[in-house]
Image (spheres, rainbow, N blue to C red):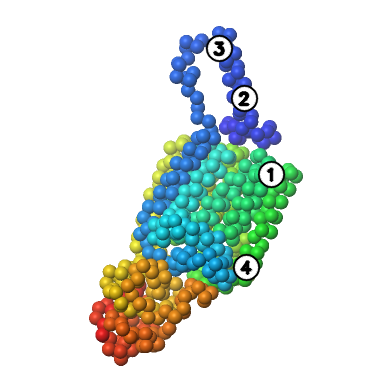
Amino acid sequence: MPWRDIPEHFGNWNTICKNFAKRVAGTLAGDLREGLVDTASIAPEKLQRRRTPFPVRRYRGASVVGFVAFTVSLAGSWVPSYWFDEVATVMAARLSWRELFTFTEYVDVVHLSYYSLMKVWIGLFGESELATRSLSALAIGAAAAGLVVLVSMFTSMHVAVISGAVFAMLPHVTFIGAEARSYAVSAAVAVWTTVVLLVALRGGRRRWWLAYAAMLIVGAAVFLYSLLLILVHGFYLWRRHRQRRVVLSWLAAAVLAVLSTLPLIQEGLRQKKQISWIAYQPGRDLWGILTEPAFQLSRDVAAGASVVALVLALCFARRLSPARRRLLGLALAWFFIPLLMLLMADAAVGSVFTPRYLSFAVPAVAVLLALAFTITPWKPVAWLLVAALALACAPGYLAQRTPLAKNDGSDLAQIADYIQRHAELGDGVFLEDSNVGNTQPRLALSGYPAAFANTTDVAFVRSFKTTGGFSDITVGFNQIGSRLDGIDRLWLVTAGSPATGELRGAPFILGAHGFAAVSEFETNRSTIVMYQR
């Protein structure tokens, strides 16, 4: 039986293990001195060799798994075009500090901490796709490393490493690891918050409980829903740690975290309308609700992994040690409590749930799969299952690294690249900014301003900084006539075909000013027409 499986009422397993090792070492030394052991029969390398201490193996394994997870998420992350949410991140990060704080008084106050972090990050590394998304890849690496540490506090390094490996390849994880949004950071903070809680439960020192409260506050600042971890941890304590001192310490830390984030919660509720778009999302069945947070739309992969996990669990359930049962309970609570709370809130107060909002709970799915994969007595089986999962996830992973992978085919980079290659100094540009969801071509100008450096934005009136949203104030196409003075070439970028959109009258309006269409180019979902006098 592993040392970690010693019942808790005997004391801390690590202390028992150390005391036993010291006693055995002392006995062996005495035997050697008394000649009771034939040293000649013991190979010198065995006398000198020492097993690597477990903490060293734990953090060495965590570092390796974290680096692999970082590499997997970072690879190809620069290929897909930005889409609306990432453009919003870059636009907010470009603001001055005063402008950023003023801007978030009207929108995205719940993302203020992440935007501040990205502002510093972009200031250091630039705003290319690789630069902005590398922070999320780094966060995924930190989350995977933290998961190894967390699981190893319950059971063997074998299970811990499998957990980190499974986490690194889940479809949702490889997606948010290449996304300039806060989801990956929220997952990393959630994992390490749980690690700090476990350390506090073992040590009981005040500084660890203060660190736990601080981690909860950081998690809520990065992504507000992460505060639901308090309920997860409370459930775990209720099941496993009912000592008065422990419960009071946890309760004090949780109350401190909630009180500290109350202003953010109030401001977030005031700006609730900014997520009203959730109400217009397609409905999901129960299977989609359960699987999309970790597997996105890879339902076949989710089904296969779930079936294998359930079969193994049913066949080898008796092999689960008490420590692994505790870990299983924590993982189940980590995933299902936030899910149920968000679903109830969604039904009670309106649309507040979409699967990616559960990113901070995805590590729990990796733990559940790892526990199932390693439940058999044959270690190679676990690695074969991990390899099978990797192969099943590979097509989705490669699809996430294509130029049009974001938002069902975002083509903002295509627009920007074409304009940059073909526009000349002094050309005018008009990018449609009508209310067409988050597919409007004008986002290309906001996401890739350097590509339009040689052109004149004939529609611009006032920056988004003063609008309380991410859209500039612009004039309608019918009003650009007076803005065409001195412009001999105009690039007109429309969503879809210009013959069917709101700008279908462009040939007549521009014809009145002496312009005629010269060329036309179609991107994935936009059309670029060049007019010349």
* Disc 2 from disc 3: Cα separation: 18 Å
Q: Quadrant of the C terminus?
A: bottom left
Indicate which label's residue lies in the foreground, 2 or 4.
4
Q: Amino acid at mark 1?
A: Arg
Q: Quadrant of residue 272?
A: bottom right
Dot label at residue 431 = none
Give percent across and percent down for residue 105: 58, 70
State if disc 4 and disc 2 touch (CB < 8 Å).
no
Residue neighbourhood size for the residue with mark 4, other residues' Cα within 10 Å, grouped as few (<14), some (14–19), many (≥20):
some
* First of labels 4, 3 by sequence position: 3
Dot label at residue 206 = 1
Secondary structure state at the residue bearing disc 2: helix
* First of labels 2, 1 by sequence position: 2
Secondary structure state at the residue bearing disc 3: helix
* Disc 2 from disc 4: Cα separation: 55 Å
Give percent across and percent down for residue 44: 45, 16
Check disc 4 and report the residue beneath it. Answer: 267
Image point 32% across, 72% down: which residue?
454
Check disc 3 and report the residue beneath it. Answer: 32
* First of labels 2, 3 by sequence position: 2
* Disc 2 from disc 1: Cα separation: 29 Å
Indicate which label's residue lies in the foreground, 4 or 3.
4
Q: Amino acid at mark 2?
A: Phe
Image point 44% across, 72% down: which residue?
438
* First of labels 4, 1 by sequence position: 1
Image point 44% across, 67% down: which residue?
87
Dot label at residue 20 = 2
Secondary structure state at the residue bearing disc 4: helix
